Image: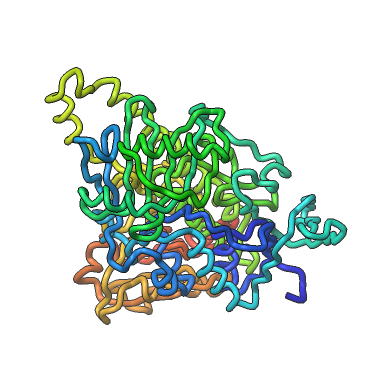
Amino acid sequence: MSAEPQVIIVGGGPVGIALAIDLAQRHISSLVLERRREIGRIPKGQSLMQRSLEHFYFWHCVDELRAARVLPAGYPIGGITAYESLTGEYWYLPEGLGGIGQYFFQENERLPQYRTEEVLRARAAELPEITLSLGKVVTEIRQSNNAVGVTFVDTEDPTAIAQVQAPYLVGCDGGRSVVRESVGITRETRDFGTRMVLAVFSSTELHERLERFPERTTYRVLHPRHHGVWQFFGRVKLGETWFYHGPVPASTTTQDTETVRAAIEEAVGAPIALEFEHIGLWDLRIDVATSYRRGRVFIAGDACHTHPPYGGLGLNTGLDDIANLGWKLSANLSGWGGEELLESYSTERQPIFAETGRDLIGAWIDDDAAFFDRFDPQRDAEEFARAWMSRTGGEFAPPWYEPHYEGSPVIVGAPSESIGIHGEHIFKAQPGHHLAPATLSSGRDVYEELGNDLALLAFGIEEEELEPLILSAAKMGIPLRVILDSYEDERLRYGSPLLLVRPDHFVAWCGDEVPGFSASLLRAICGLPLLTNEG
């Protein structure tokens, strides 16, 4: 990159690199400053939901991602929930993600985060708009009315100090975000007061012991003494390598291998032969930033929200953040996105995780603790068995988890003014909701026709009737992809023949006919000031 970048991205993990890719495909240049020189090998962030795979499809590396999985192709993705230990009498198969798969264009996937990062870095290397600078630490951030400047140093040579500026900066630098702290964005926290361990270990014996269950990728243990806090095993390499999350005494250190071994064996329900590859410690807490923006500085991913690795929501939520932000930055830098569009990033995304932390992750812990306060097999085995077998919750988000932006100022005609996670997956197109797939008369899916631009889906409507929208978009410099087809078969499920779909594949507006206020409609969606002389 010879000229100054249009966006500085601090943090080159999966969220930061994905943002750079998203911007580059819209011809926006970026400089990514990453502290690490090598990709870490801890197998976190393994579960990728259907929505995340849609992102990888549009980043043109979904096939590479699926090829990078460690587990055998077709190995069942899902979990087992057991009472007290993995050798205990009571267990069940939680609901998986399959029930919502029909509402997405891609199936979910599972692979270690380091493999995901490798795929993203390979894709980024193909795009000349991206400059990745490794071993760099940001020491200062400065804002003016027109730009953001940063000072950074090399981790191996503190005398190698450099400066750069750009119109915008995005902090994707994790839970201890320097960017967030530098610009004074505060966080709300719920601390459960529990020390947790992340252990990576090899054990063929554990694999053999789990042959009593159907084949699954994760195993969750709920023990009353832990008050709703999970003990959680996940497969990394089939039959060999595992990770484990679970509570440990507050005094535990990374050298206390016997303490960690005892915790693992408590959850297994028996001694097992194992060999540790990594031991790390973390605190059980939920943090969410009160805002995702301060002036020309934005934050995304763990810089915005951190939480226990429950529900497969961490990396997936971060990827959703940048899918929301990328097109908005591009629109602004390209001249067709206004200030309100930029502000809508925080308006839309912050409530999503605020509710996720409170109503999903925190509620999981509270509800599990309440269950064991109410039911006890030692007190009433029959009552406990009935209650236990009625449970369906597991390590994935429930079917009602349906993030939407109905109350966003850049969504038009939504049925409510709410923004949150409570909803229902349906095929009907609704403003503020994710677009479900549908087969076109050509045999291709509508997702195969969508691209990086705002899209107008017109079913059973002549192109001449669309001229007010098309001409208004051209006049305002808004790239508009028009998709024409008949209004029949699966397209009828949308419930409207006209849909405006945002570049992040959320419905911005739908209707039965081209509105007389086409220009005003487009201005609202793009966050541009309304003009009194436009129709």
* Left or right: 382 in relation to 31: left
Looking at the image, which residue sits at the far top?
379
Task: Provide residue 513's location: percent of width, then percent of height.
Answer: 33, 65
The residue located at (20%, 35%) in the rendering is 90
The mark total stands at: 0
* Image location of residue 27, percent across then percent down: 61, 74
Rendering quarter of residue 80:
top left
Residue 406 placement (x, y as % from top left): 41, 48
Outermost residue on the bottom side: it is 442
Residue 405 in view in this figure: no
Residue 51 sits above or below residue 80 on the image: below
Q: Nearer the viewer, residue 464 or 179?
A: 179
Determine whether, in the image, residue 215 is placed left or right of residue 253. Answer: left
**Residue nearest the observer in this picture, 34 or 223:** 223
Specify whether 351 is left or right of 82. right
Report the residue at 70% width, 46% height from top: 178
User: Measuring 72% from the left and 61% from the top, which residue is drawn there?
Assistant: 135
Residue that appears at 48% across and 64% down: 116
Q: Is residue 290 above or below residue 161?
A: above
